[in-house]
Amino acid sequence: MTEPRCDPALQAPDGDAPAPGLRADPSARLTEAFRAVAARMDGLPIVNPALAVEAVGFAPWQGHWLGVMLTPWFMNLVIAPGDESAWQPLPPGARRSHAFPAGAYEFIGARDEIAGEFQMCSLFSPVLRAVLWVSGCAGSGGSECVPGGVDEVVPRPVTGKP
């Protein structure tokens, strides 16, 4: 089995600790929302029944929350509002690039009654093959742990470094 490693390009920088006024960690809301969707999708061919809905590694990032949503049909990088005054709304389906040390990645806007507004970037979809995920890496300082490194599942940046 490949040992998971965490990509420093996706880690919250030192000193990017929760600030006063930052909305609560969206992990519970996102998990609840996607569990409801998963119940409706049960049995569809794109669903991997070996996987469960899990919000992983959400941490403060540029005044907002950054983490990974794993579901039985996708693994997405998610940005959710932290500082409401700095949040730039993105209509559902609209696209926006966000800069990371590894380059710019395209996110699409989304909204859910339970989770509220968020933006997501597909890392891996569908996840029909087993994803070896290390639960509990959420305590690793906000890094997202993926077997073999994030380079295996993260699409190439839309701009910046190849």
Image: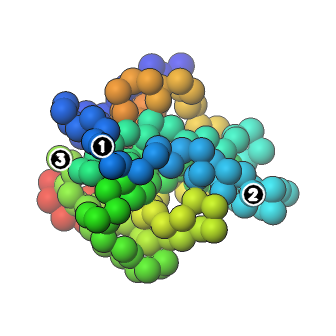
Which of disc 1 and disc 3 is earlier in sequence? 1
Q: Residue at x 39, y 24 (%)?
A: 140
| Label 1 sits on residue | 20
Answer above or below: position of 46 versus 113.
Answer: above
Q: CA distance from mark 3 to mark 1?
A: 26 Å
Residue 71 at x, y = what percent? 63, 49
Residue 110 at x, y = what percent? 50, 70
Task: Say whether residue 82 is left or right of residue 101.
Answer: right
Mark 3, mark 1: which one is toward the viewer?
Answer: 1
Residue 31 at x, y = what percent? 63, 48
Q: Nearer the viewer, residue 123 or 15?
A: 15
| Label 3 sits on residue | 101
Is residue 41 visible to the viewer in this orientation of the structure? yes
| Label 2 sits on residue | 36
Secondary structure of the residue carrying numbered label 2: helix
Badge 3: few (under 14), some or many (20 or more) residues near its Cα, within 10 Å? few
Answer above or below: position of 32 versus 119.
Answer: above
